[in-house]
Amino acid sequence: MSTLDLVPTYVKGIDRLLFGGFKLGELYFIYGEEKSGKTSLALTLCASAIRNGLRPLFLDCSIRLHPQRVLQILESWSLDPSKLSIRMIQDFQDQEDFILHLYNSEKLFDIIVLDDFTHQHRIEMYGEVRSDLPIYKRLAMQVAMLSELTTRDKSLVVLIGQVHDLPEQENRKAVAYRILSHWARWIIKLTIGSKGFRELFLEKPEKTGPAYFIINESGVGEPSSKVE
């Protein structure tokens, strides 16, 4: 069993911005627009975890994960695909039940990624404040349980969220940003930059960045040319 405290991405700019990599025992919230590299970054983190002897779990909350993409990344790292546990979340209740299962069990995984964490929450919403309040409370309870896992089990939990679909507004925030930002020790925003580069900004615990990266067959990697 690994005694690693940090899980590196092996992208110099990202690891430098994150003080060496993603830290076990912490809750991270990553958000950004479509195709900004969120899932590729998460799968890179899972691959790095496997390489370093850790047990990752990938929860696909929107059932949009492409199996071929998973295989491409893990094979690029020369890893056994069976080392990555993947579970598809069917609905908001299924998500809640599984998080409760993790919470009530002895430590099962070192790293837990929940991709598009608010997807089922968004489907559940009515669009009316009084009706939606209990749904927000359930989401907050899920995040609270995941947060406790980080301290109790020294697990690394990564929540991935989408931004509001309001392209005319600047500084777009993620769905349920207040809840997620309250519990997350680290908040990371991804954007699409020039020349096909992706940009990573750290918003919490301090605002800094960007770090630049590309999306490739290994997940994410170093920019292939100078960033202007």
Image (cartoon, rainbow, N blue to C red):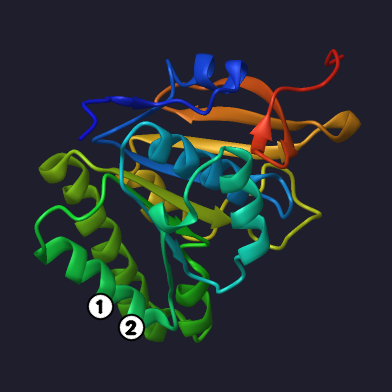
What residue lies at 34% left-to-right and 81% top-to-bottom? 94
Query: Which residue is at the front of the view, 93 or 223?
Result: 223
Dot 2: few (<14), some (14–19), or many (≥20) neighbours within 10 Å?
some
What residue lies at 61% left-to-right and 17% top-to-bottom? 13
Q: Quadrant of the N terminus?
A: top left
Query: Which residue is at the front of the view, 38 or 220?
Result: 220
Q: Position of residue 216 (x, y in %)?
A: 74, 39
Secondary element under disc 2, as helix, strand or loop, is helix
Amino acid carrying mark 2 in the image: Gln
Left or right relative to 33: residue 129: left
Q: CA distance from mark 2 to mark 1?
A: 6 Å
Give above or below for 191 relative to 123: above
Mark 1 lies on residue: 97
Give above or below for 202 relative to 107: above
Q: Which mark is residue 140?
A: none
Mark 2 lies on residue: 93
Dot 1: few (<14), some (14–19), or many (≥20) neighbours within 10 Å?
few
Q: Position of residue 156 (x, y in %)?
A: 31, 41
Give above or below for 98 relative to 204: below
Secondary element under disc 1, as helix, strand or loop, is helix
Left or right relative to 54: residue 81: right
Q: Quadrant of the C terminus?
A: top right
What residue lies at 15% left-to-right and 40% top-to-bottom? 151
Contact, mark 2 vs mark 1 (Cβ under 8 Å): yes
Left or right relative to 30: residue 23: left
Q: Position of residue 50 (x, y in %)?
A: 40, 40
Amino acid carrying mark 1 in the image: Asp
Q: Quadrant of residue 28?
A: top left
Query: Which residue is at the front of the view, 82 or 156?
Result: 82
Observer able to see residue 212: yes
What residue lies at 43% left-to-right and 24% top-to-bottom? 21
